[in-house]
Amino acid sequence: MSTRALRRLKGKQRGQEALDAGDLTLDDSPEELLDTASSSPPSDSKGRKAKKNKAQKNFSNIYELIGDADNEAEIISPDEEEDTPDENKTSGTEKKDDIEKPDEKQENASTKSSGDRVKKKKKKKKTKVTEGQDAVPDDNIDLILENLEQPNGLGLQNEDCGGSDRRSVLHVEHRNLNSETELKRYFGARAVQGDQRPRQRNRQFHRSTWMTIPKDSWPRFSRPGISMTLLQSKDGIQYFTFEHGRDYQQVQFKFLDAVESMDPNNIVALLQLNPYHIDSLLQLSDVCRIQEDQEMARDLIERAMYSFECAFHPLFSLTSSTSRLDYLRTENRAFYLALYKHMMFLEKRGCPRTALEYCKLILSLDPDSDPLCMLLLIDFLTLRSREYHSLLQLHQEWEEHRNLSQLPNFAFSTALCHFHLSQLEDVDPEESEKERHKADQLLQDALIMFPGVLIPLLDLCTVQPDAAVSSHVFFGPKSQLGQPPALAELTSLYVGRTHSLWREAAVMLWLEESVKEVLRRVDAKDPLVEECQNKRKQRYQSAPRNIHRHVLLSEIKEATSSLPLEVTSQPVMGFDPLPPLDSVMSYTRPERQHVGATNESTLSLFFRSLLPNFNLQGGPRPEDELEVARAGQELNQEVNRLMVAMRDMLANIRFQEPPRDENPYRDEEEWD
């Protein structure tokens, strides 16, 4: 018997024969071992094998879990081989029989011992087959294995693919929430991490989190007073909310006072005392971003996210897409805004795949109402990260109940997805032609439905349109001026955000071909043109509040200029832009009592000198003196009217300028 077969039988690796302690027993002397190792005739291999097996029976080895009866049945001596029935032997030569016997021992041992992990995958497959078919001759084993391995492999592969397809379109992966994962994929781990090692001295202990990595430069973390509570669980969906403690509420009131003072230094002073106050971090981050300190702005947002993640409920999940947060509650809005601002920093940093995960996370928190309108952004991040199939899956699953094709961004982005899929190199020619035909059809329908997108898109791409296109009535200035206000806001938002995706030469040629085909269909009086025109007139009359909120957060000039007057005329706070009209507030801010007259204007001091009881803000009234309070309120109203009249009078005063001298160069000493 060959040494290779013996090594396979014992489960040893190559080159380990001299280190095996099972070969050294009390019955074997060193001289016998040397003689056994030096003997070269092949006829003595069976005797050496039987002798070694008998010696190993009295010594602990990897086969000691096998019963004695099994060992006796497996160990076959040369004399017993001659007495075995012919039906259990193959018709091969004696040399082939000697090689196949250890394989049979290997199969029997692997079926009865579960601790042997050194065996190869092929031997494990043979073991599974021999368990159910003990009476099958050895000649048919290889044929049976070939027939059984193929369907099993395909079945497992199909199950894996089916499991990935059954995932929700909003499924989030933990590893994709870290931007370093994407940066390492682009530049390598050494380029991202460098040779810097964390210093063990003066190192703070931070809680392990998924969204951010705590930095040693941050202040020592202490719970700021935010907690998360589970409200209810219904149909597999869990509804949570953040809650503010009593101390945190007092800090929140101080923050509102600092915002009203219009001085960022007051917010900085508040953060020095409360380094993990969420709204202060968000507001100061906007100030740093306006001052072009991007690194500090991003660091403040990450600190706010770390504070939120430390307050998570144990059942709150970032990846299951079954955890909900109601945007109507004021305590939950800061979490939405922190995620959105962090997502925009990641997109500008060149991490679109990580930004896409945060976009799906925000959308999964409230997919029905979508308070930040992430459906206007998810297509752009998906195209940038080249996740074409996921965008098409989202469009297919949500089109029925969300009507996504009526949004300009989805109408053009789905066509762009099919075009990029047709340009892949590893796609069959038939599949590529099919994707290209689908892309042409979708792009033509999008241009017919939203003709006001073409000219602004070409302008931002620095492409001069053809005279036949720019002078045509369908794509000319009339199509842009005749758009409803809500549609103009959506188209300007899409063009301002995604124009960089259309600058590729191949994409621009494809767009040119589609525009020519659309003009031909318009001139041929295609019924789809009139149908889309009627849809534009009936729809897009007024945009909902979440779209206005999204446009304000995007800070795209083309879109913000198209906002209606009722949005631009009211003040917008960075920590809570356009709050919902039906907000749910768990606590209210107490009224401020103006003690003294240090912050009052000169006109207010004048009226206070005339009327000592005058109060411009209308202070609190005692409940037991309602009549006096009503009289004082009427007096304040009259005084306010008087102040308005005096303000108008002062505004209409025009001072007459002194007459100018006709000869300015006249000598002052001259007299008439």
Image: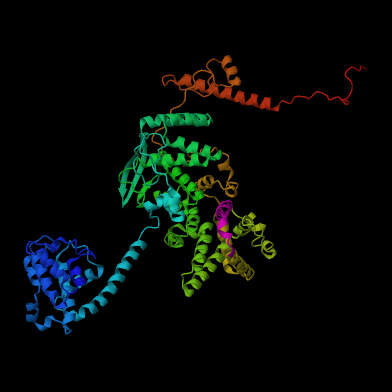
Quarter occupied by the N terminus? bottom left
Q: Residue at x 49, y 21 (%)?
A: 594
Front residue of 161/398: it is 161
Quarter occupied by the C terminus? top right
492 in magenta: yes
Q: Where in the figure is residue 654, as x and y percent of width and height?
A: 74, 26
Q: Main secondary structure of the magenta part?
A: helix
Q: Where in the figure is residue 18, as x and y percent of width and height?
A: 19, 63
* Above/below status of 475 relative to 561: below
* Quarter holding residue 110: bottom left
In the rendered view, does 453 fall on the left or right side of 283?
right
In the rendered view, does 591 fall on the left or right side of 566?
left
In the rendered view, does 574 fall on the left or right side of 360?
right
Q: Where in the figure is residue 627, as x and y percent of width and height?
A: 46, 20
Q: Residue at x 44, y 63 (%)?
A: 389
* Quarter holding residue 22: bottom left
Question: In the rendered image, is residue 218 in sight?
Answer: yes
Question: In the rendered image, is residue 577 in sight?
Answer: no
* Above/below status of 294 relative to 397: above
Bounds of the magenta segment: 485-505
In the rendered view, does 641 fall on the left or right side of 577?
right
Q: Where in the figure is residue 71, as x and y percent of width and height?
A: 9, 68
Front residue of 557/126: it is 126
503 in magenta: yes
* Quarter holding residue 223: top left
- Furthest residue in direction right, as rendered: 672
